[in-house]
Amino acid sequence: MSACTRLRRRNGFTLVEVLVSVAMLGILVLPLMGIFTQSLRSVHAGRAQVTAAFHAQRLMDDFVLADAAGRVPLGRTAIDGTFSFERAVRTHPGTGLTEVVITVFWQQGAIARTLRVVSLVAPR
């Protein structure tokens, strides 16, 4: 090997080596970005479902604490700009138990989502 070749080799990487390494890095990073995007979607979906469950539990608690006048079925009612709910009430003859079904609705992208909570409430 000549002195000129050895000197050139010590100065750094060639343009081809840099381009190949950048291309390899890009190929490795693209799948990771897809995984990151999917995880963000999952977090958002989970947050919406937890919020819907919170609303359903709060509505169920309100029903249990309400007097007889407040224990009626309700059609679709807005909670906020994102969520709405329906409440169905049915009394089981003989037992006196009241079945309460609260369904929370929300839109997640193009998909309509629902969460349903069913409970039996004893008479006071």
Image: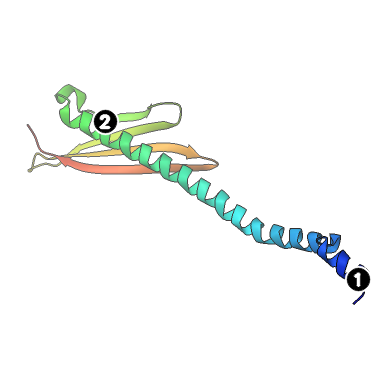
* Whole-percent x, y for residue 16 in the image: 84, 63
Mark 1 lies on a secondary structure that is helix
CA distance separating discs 2 and 1: 92 Å
Question: Residue at the location (72% across, 63% down)?
Answer: 24
How many other residues sit within 10 Å of disc 2, few (<14), some (14-19) or many (≥20)? few
Residue 2 lies left or right of residue 50; in this view the side is right
At horizontal 41% and vertical 32% (from top left) the residue drawn is: 83
Look at the image and tell me in which quarter the N terminus lies. Answer: bottom right
The quarter of the picture where residue 62 lies is: top left
Disc 1: which residue: 3
Q: Amino acid at mark 1?
A: Ala
The answer to whether residue 51 is left or right of residue 5 is: left
Q: Is residue 118 above or below residue 79?
A: below
48 or 107, which lies in front? 48
Mark in front: 2 vs 1: 1
Residue under the point 9% across and 39% down: 96
Q: Quadrant of residue 21?
A: bottom right
Query: How far from the left and from the top, in percent, is residue 108?
Result: 50, 40
**Image spot of residue 88 (x, y percent):** 27, 36
- Point out the tag, 2 or 1, that comes first from the N-terminus: 1
Identify the mark at residue 73; answer none if there is no mark: 2
Side of 47 where 4 appears, left or right: right
Circle 2: element type: loop
Q: Amino acid at mark 2?
A: Pro
Q: Residue at x 78, y 63 (%)?
A: 20
